[in-house]
Image (cartoon, helix red, strand yellow):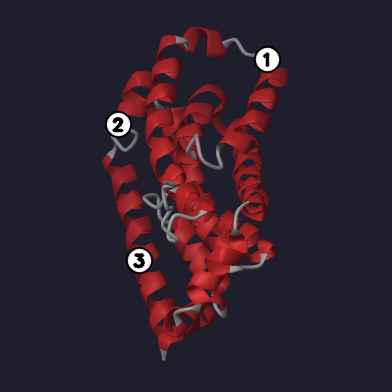
């Protein structure tokens, strides 16, 4: 007797679950590695950092959260980490879009199309996709890989995903690099990245702006 697989268990559904769980696991592993091998990491050459950047550009799609990487890169490289971090962010977005081509994208769209109301809401939101992507990426609490997957599956244009992702993630990336650059101990930094009151205020502000912006765009789309 064959085990029937529910229709809701699709490639995108499994990928979404993986992109929600694996960053939590790898954040702990990355924290442990950075603390234990701090001295060795500090001695890395420019070419080694370039190799790490290329590797993280692929793993950031679902394993290594870019904000965590920004803290670590900022701690060791200071403001020189800006360019590598943007390479990592764009690499993660492109990797997810390539991954979607491997998944049963048509099945996901067919599932949405069976619900006319859901399809109507999605179509209206996509009319303002750049704004939606910008405000979603602005929030430090939304998973990087999962949001990239959802935007790719929704049919959003790649140029809007890249532009909205760049504009939305710039403030939080620069904030994380600054926090890493100012930190004196990497263990304290990674265990409590928002230890200063100024950083906490900025993070809360980004979350509020993100929620308010998404609410306004969605409400305007539903009218």
SS under mark 3: helix
Q: Give the residue drawn at x 51%, y 60%.
A: 150
Q: Farthest residue toward the front?
A: 1
Please tell me in which quadrant of the rendered image residue 155 appears. bottom right
* Mark 2 / mark 1, whichever is N-terminal: 1
The CA span between labels 1 and 3 is: 41 Å
Mark drawn on residue 186: none
**Neighbours of disc 2 within 10 Å: few (<14), some (14-19), many (20+):** few
- Residue 192's disc is 2
Which residue position holds label 1?
45
Q: How many marks?
A: 3
State the residue position of label 3.
211
Residue 54, relative to residue 97: is it above or below?
above
Helix, strand or loop for disc 2: loop
Residue 84 coordinates in the image, percent (x, y): 64, 35
Question: Secondary structure under badge 1?
Answer: loop
Q: Earlier in the sequence, mark 1 or mark 3?
A: 1
Task: Give how far apart the Cα atoms at labels 3 and 2 are.
Answer: 24 Å
Instruction: Locate the C terminus and report the quarter of the image it occupies.
Output: bottom left
87 in relation to 77, above or below: below
Residue at point 45% right, 57% down?
138
Residue 34 seen: yes
10 Å crowding of disc 1: few (<14), some (14-19), many (20+): few
Residue sticking out furthest to the bottom:
223
Q: CA distance from mark 2 to mark 1?
A: 28 Å
User: Where on the picture, by quarter, is residue 126?
Assistant: bottom right
């Amino acid at each position: 007797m064959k085990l029937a697989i529910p229709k809701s268990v699709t490639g995108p559904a499994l990928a979404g679950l993986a992109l929600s769980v694996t960053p939590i696991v790898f954040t702990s592993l990355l924290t442990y590695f950075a603390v234990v091998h701090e001295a060795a990491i500090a001695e890395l050459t420019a070419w080694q950092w370039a190799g790490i950047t290329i590797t993280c550009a692929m793993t950031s799609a679902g394993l290594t959260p870019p904000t965590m990487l920004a803290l670590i890169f900022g701690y060791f490289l200071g403001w020189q980490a800006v360019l590598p971090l943007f390479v990592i962010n764009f690499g993660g977005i492109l990797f997810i879009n390539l991954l979607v081509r491997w998944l049963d994208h048509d099945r996901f769209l067919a599932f949405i199309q069976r619900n006319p109301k859901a399809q109507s809401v999605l179509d209206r939101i996509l009319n303002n996709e750049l704004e939606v992507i910008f405000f979603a990426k602005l929030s430090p609490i939304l998973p990087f890989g999962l949001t990239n997957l959802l935007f790719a599956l929704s049919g959003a244009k790649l140029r809007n995903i890249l532009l909205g992702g760049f504009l939305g993630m710039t403030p939080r990336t620069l904030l994380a690099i600054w926090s890493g650059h100012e930190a004196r101990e990497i263990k304290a930094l990674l265990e409590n990245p928002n230890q200063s009151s100024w950083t906490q205020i900025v993070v809360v502000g980004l979350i509020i702006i993100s929620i308010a912006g998404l609410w306004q765009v969605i409400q305007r789309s539903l009218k």
